[in-house]
Every structure is written in C-alpha cells, then in structure tokens.
C-alpha cells in the first residue's frame, strides 16, 4: 500500500511536473513572442528616432533657407525703395528739364515775337521816316515858294 501511495504520489508529481512543464513551455513561448514584439518595437523606435533626426535636420535646413529668403526679401525691399526713390528723383529731374525746355521754348517764342515786333517797328519807323521826309520836302517846297513870292 505504501508502494501504491508512493506510485500514486509519483504519478501525481509527474502529472504536476508535466503540467508545470507544459505551463513552462507556454510561458517560454509567450516570453519568446514578447521578446519578438519587443525587438520589433525596438526596431520601430530606432526607425522613428532616425525619422525624427531626419525631420529635425530638414527643419533646420528649412529654417536656414527661410532666414536666407527673409534676408533676400529685406534686401529686395530696400532695392525697391531705392529704385522708387531713384525713379522719383528722375521724374523730378525730368519735370525740371521739361520746365526748362518749356521756359526755353517760351524764351524762344518771346525772342521770335520781339524780332517780329522789331521788324514791324523798323518798318513802321521806315514808313514814318519816309512820310516825315516827304512832309519835310513839301514844307521846304512850300517855304521856297513863299520865300520866292516875297
């Protein structure tokens, strides 16, 4: 009977050991699966870290490019302001030159008018001188006739 009890205990222990072995195998399988999941997650984390570094590098490059674009934009705005100032100055100069041309044209017109007036007056003077000479001659003739009559 003791032998039977020992055999029964041994059978129970073997069954329990088999159950424990099965449980251990299941736990080992679960452990391997979790290790694989952990490895996969670790690989994903490494990939994401690389992606983050790439994104940060690209962001840095874009920030540098943005700073350059802003700098160029400021330079271009300054050039536009200078160009507008130059255009305004040129327009003022052109207006002054037009005024000068206009004044020169006015002066030329006045000179022409003066020349025409001089010519008209010279002609009028010549006519008046001729008339005066004719009258002087008539008066002299009349005077001579009267002196001859006396």
Image (spheres, rainbow, N blue to C red):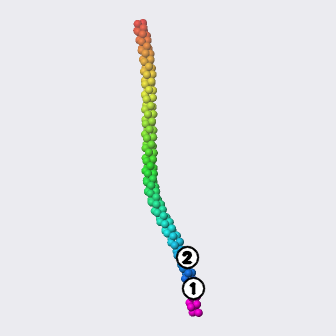
Can residue 150 be spotted in the picture? no
Residue that numbered label 2 is attached to: 26
Say few, some or many: other residues with alpha carbon within 10 Å of mark 2 (under 14 / 14 to 19 / 20 or more): few
Mark carried by residue 104: none
Examine the rendered structure and indicate whether residue 143 appears above or below residue 54. Answer: above
Residue that numbered label 1 is attached to: 11
Secondary structure predominantly adopted by residues drawn in magenta: helix
**SS class of the residue under badge 1?**
helix
Say few, some or many: other residues with alpha carbon within 10 Å of mark 1 (under 14 / 14 to 19 / 20 or more): few
Tell whether position 118 is magenta. no
Please tell me which residue lies in front, 65 or 146.
Answer: 65
User: Which quadrant of the view contains residue 68?
Assistant: bottom left
Residue 82, percent across and down? 43, 47
Judged left or right of residue 5, residue 111 is: left
User: Where does the N terminus fall, quadrant-wise?
Assistant: bottom right
Label whose residue precedes the other's in the sequence (2 or 1): 1
Q: How many numbered badges does the structure rendering display?
A: 2
Q: Which residue is found at the position 56% from the left and 81% from the top?
A: 18
Q: Which residue is found at the position 43% from the left and 28% from the top?
A: 111
Examine the rendered structure and indicate whether residue 85 appears above or below residue 108. Answer: below
Which contiguous range is marked in magenta? 1-11
Please tell me which residue lies in front, 25 or 12.
Answer: 12
Residue 32, percent across and down? 52, 73
Q: Nearer the viewer, mark 2 or mark 1?
A: 1
Farthest-out residue, bottom: 1
């Amino acid at each position: 009977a003791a032998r039977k009890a020992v055999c029964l205990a041994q059978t129970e222990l073997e069954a329990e050991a088999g159950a424990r072995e099965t449980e251990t195998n299941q736990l080992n399988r679960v452990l391997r699966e979790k290790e694989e999941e952990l490895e996969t997650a670790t690989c994903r984390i490494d990939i994401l870290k690389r992606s983050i570094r790439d994104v940060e590098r690209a962001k840095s490059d874009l920030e540098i490019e943005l700073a350059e674009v802003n700098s160029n934009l400021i330079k271009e705005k300054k050039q536009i302001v200078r160009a507008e100032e130059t255009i305004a100055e040129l327009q003022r100069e052109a207006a002054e030159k037009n005024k000068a041309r206009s004044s020169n044209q006015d002066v030329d017109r006045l000179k022409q008018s003066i020349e025409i007036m001089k010519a008209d007056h010279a002609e009028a003077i010549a006519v008046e001188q001729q008339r005066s000479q004719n009258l002087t001659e008539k008066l002299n003739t009349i005077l001579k006739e009267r002196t001859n009559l006396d």
